[in-house]
Amino acid sequence: MQGLGRIIIDEKAETGKSYTLGKEGVNALAFWEARAGEAVTVSDAGDRLYRARLIDTGGKTGTRIYVFEEMGEAKNGPEITLLQALPEKERMELIIQKAAELGVNAIVPFKSQRSISLEERDSRQKKAHKWQDVARRASKQSRSEFIPLIHPYCPFADALDISKGASLKIALWERPGIRLIKDILSDSKKDRIGKAAILVGPEGGLEGEEMNLAIKAGFSPASLGRRILRTETAAIMAVGLLRYELAS
C-alpha cells in the first residue's frame, strides 16, 4: 500500500511485549526520525495496529520496540491520492498537514493554467523542500501508521498519469449542473474501490481544456455545493469526505 514508513512486526503482536524489528521494519522506522523513548504506530502480521515505544535503536539486541496499546484493524478503506494545483503562500503546507491527518496516501502538487508556478514561489521563499517533513510531522501528531508520499511538483498531464491506477477518480469543478460529490460517492461500489484520486484545482478552478483532459483520463466532475471555497478548504473537505465515505 502506498505511503511511507509502515512499520510491520513480522508476527502477531501482543500488548506488554517487546519485539525486534526486521530489516524492512528498521528501514520504515527511519522515515519517522524517531528517537529512543518515542512512540510510533506499528502493524503486525494479523493486520492490526498498535502503539509501540522505541526502546533500543540498533545495539547488540537490534532495534527493539515495546508494544503498549492496541488500536484496532489496520484497514481504513482505499488508498487516496490528492492531485493538488499549487497554491500561493503557505497554503500547500496547510493542505499537506491536514490531508496527512485525514489519512491521504499520496499528494501530487501540479502546475495548472491558473496556478502559481513553483519557480515563482521559490523566487519569493523556498519551501517545497519541507513538504515531506510537514507530512511526517502531521502523521506523527495523528498517530498514523504511514506518511503520505509527496510527489515532485509536475505538469498537469503528469499528475493525471500518476492517478491512472485509481478506480474512482473525482475532479472538483464549480460549474452549474455538476453533480454533488456526495451523490457520486453514494452511487459508487465502495467495496470494489482499491484506489481513489481527487483532483483539486487552483483559485478560480480548472480551465475547461484541463477538465476535458481530466475527463478523458477517467475523472468525474463533482461539486462540493453552492459555496465557493478556497483551494485549501476544498482539498481538505474532499479528502475528508472520501476517507469518511469509503472507510472500511
Image (cartoon, rainbow, N blue to C red):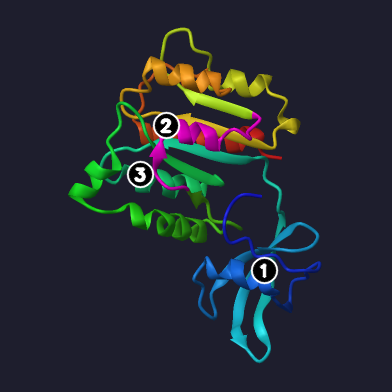
Say which of 153 and 99 sits in front. Answer: 153
Residue 237 showing in the rendered view: no
Q: Which mark is residue 172?
A: none
**Do the residues bearing badges 2 and 3 touch, measured as CB atoms within 8 Å?**
no
204 lies left or right of 191: left
Tell me which corner region of the image, top left, top right, bottom left or bottom right, holds residue 14. bottom right
Q: Which mark is residue 156?
A: 2
Query: 63 above or below 168?
Result: below
Tell me which corner region of the image, top left, top right, bottom left or bottom right, holds residue 104. top right
The residue mark sitting in front, 2 or 3, is: 2
The residue mark sitting in front, 3 or 1, is: 1
Q: Which residue is label 1 attached to? A: 24
- Residue type at mark 3: give it: Met
**Residue positioned 73% across, 25% down in the render:** 189
173 lies left or right of 10: left
What SS does tag 1 mark? helix
Mark toward the start of the polypeptide (2 vs 1): 1
Q: Which residue of the protein is positioned furthest toward the top in this rendering?
A: 177
Mark toward the start of the polypeptide (2 vs 3): 3
121 lies left or right of 242: left
Q: Which residue is label 3 attached to? A: 92
**Do the residues bearing badges 3 and 1 touch, measured as CB atoms within 8 Å?**
no
